[in-house]
Amino acid sequence: MPKKHGVYSILYRDPANNGSILCAVDWSWQVPGEWTRSEKDGVQWWCKWRSAGQLNNRAYRAILKHFGLKKFSAVFPMKKIVGMSPAKLATARRCKERRLGLPKKEMISDTIGSHCSAESCN
C-alpha cells in the first residue's frame, strides 16, 4: 500500500501584508485536484491555517518558482497550473532539465513533518 503523504504545500511571503501573514499554496487541500491558497497570522505552531481562496498571481508565481518553471510561464499559464499535480509539474521540470541541460532541481513539500518529494505526490 502506498504511503499517504500530507498536503503538498509551498510557502511564500506576500509583501502586501508586510510579512505578518504566512501564505501557502496547497495541492488538493480545499479543492481535490487543484492548487488553492491558505494563510495564517504569524508563524507559531498554534496559529491555524485558513483557506484564502483560488490562486492569485503571487501564488501562481510561487508555484512556478518552486518547480523552476518561471522562464516557461507562457507554456504554463495559471489556468493550466491550477490543475497540475506536484508530480506532473515535477515531470515537466525534469523534461526541461533533459532537453535544455538545466541543473536538477529538488522539489520538496514545505509541509511541516511531511517533506515528500513532488514526484511522489499526485
Image (cartoon, grey):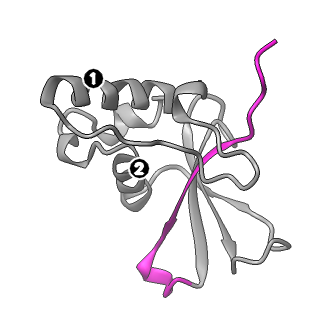
- Classify mark 1: helix, strand or loop: helix
Whichever of labels 2 and 1 marks the residue nearer the N terminus, that label is: 2
Residue 100 shown in magenta: no
- Classify mark 2: helix, strand or loop: helix
Residue 42, placed above or below residue 62: below
Q: The N terminus lies in which quarter of the figure?
A: top right
**Relative to 122, is 49 on the left or the right?**
right
Residue at (27, 23) in percent of width and height: 95
| Identity, as a three-letter code, of the amino acid under mark 1 | Cys
Residue at (45, 37) in percent of width and height: 82
Between 105 and 70, the one lying in front of the other is 105
How dense is the environment of label 2, judged by Cα within 10 Å: few (below 14), some, or many (20 and up)?
A: some
Residue 35 marker: none
The picture places residue 87, in percent across and down from the top left corner, at: 50, 26
Residue at (44, 24) in percent of width and height: 88
Number of numbered markers = 2
Residue at (25, 48) in percent of width and height: 70
The picture places residue 15, in percent across and down from the top left corner, at: 42, 80
Dividing the picture into quarters, in which one does residue 28 lie?
A: top right
Mark 1 sits on what residue? 95
Question: Farthest residue in the right direction?
Answer: 46
| Identity, as a three-letter code, of the amino acid under mark 2 | His
Residue 15 shown in magenta: yes
Question: Farthest residue in the top direction?
Answer: 1
The picture places residue 96, in percent across and down from the top left corner, at: 23, 29
Looking at the rendering, the stretch of residues picked out in magenta corresponds to 1-19
Mark 2 sits on what residue? 66
Question: Farthest residue in the left direction?
Answer: 100
**Relative to 22, is 63 on the left or the right?**
left
Between 49 and 53, the one lying in front of the other is 49
Q: The C terminus lies in which quarter of the figure?
A: top right
Dividing the picture into quarters, in which one does residue 5 lie?
A: top right
